[in-house]
Image: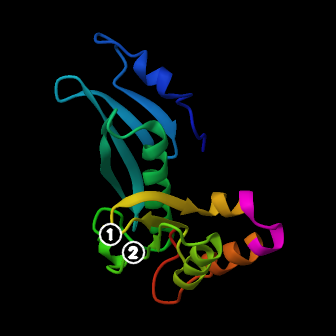
Amino acid sequence: MARELIASDATIKAVRKGDERLRLNDGDGLYLLLFVNGGQHGWRFAYTFQTRRKLISLGTYPNTSLALARRKADAARALVAEGLDPKTTSIERFISSELITCRDGDNLEKCEKAMQEHQIRRVPIVDGEDCCIGIVSQADLALKDKPEKVHKTVAEISKPEASTPSIAP
């Protein structure tokens, strides 16, 4: 199927009241329903689960940007591929209650080790009062580390766990 038929946020912003279109399609089941609830646009994702057609709401535009709606739709597709219904699957199934953080002043190696041990792609950096002051991501590692080291980290983070479906955060 075609993907990314909505060129950018500018395409959405160009839509005005009185537009005869009911929706803007982005392909693979993702579309933006125009002028829902008196002016807001609503993201919808249509999918098939166990031979039945289903529909979920992914938020309203501009609160949910085009990029975020695409990421949410990709996550929903991954759930369907794992045999789970995105409409009824609880997010708690995929998140841990333990927050993994690094402290201000910790070196990059400590953040990298935390990513590998806990299979996470981003580590919040907190100050002495536990307030988030930044985030270290895989991209940050790629900019600072040697390619072999980054490859090892990405491989560790990406190892599938037997107990949960392999959904990227």
Q: Which of 44 and 62 is in front in this view?
A: 62
Q: Do the residues labelled 1 and 2 touch (CB within 8 Å)?
A: yes
Give the residue type that dot 2 points to. Answer: Phe
* Type of secondary structure dominating the magenta stretch: helix
Say which residue appears at 39% left-offset and 49% top-offset: 46
Specify the farthest residue to the top: 18
* Range drawn in magenta: 143-149
Say which residue appears at 32% left-offset and 79% top-offset: 97
Q: Can residue 89 be seen in this view?
A: no
Q: Is residue 49 visible?
A: yes
Tag count: 2
Q: What element carries label 2?
A: loop
x and y, in percent, of residue 99 in the image: 37, 76
Can you say whether 76 is above or below 34 in the image? below
x and y, in percent, of residue 84 in the image: 40, 72
Q: Is mark 1 on a helix, strand or loop?
A: helix
Give the residue type that dot 1 points to. Answer: Ile
Q: Is residue 108 left or right of residue 162?
A: right
Q: Nearer the viewer, residue 80 or 151?
A: 151
Q: In this view, does 89 lie to the left or right of 125?
A: left
Label 1 belongs to which residue?
91
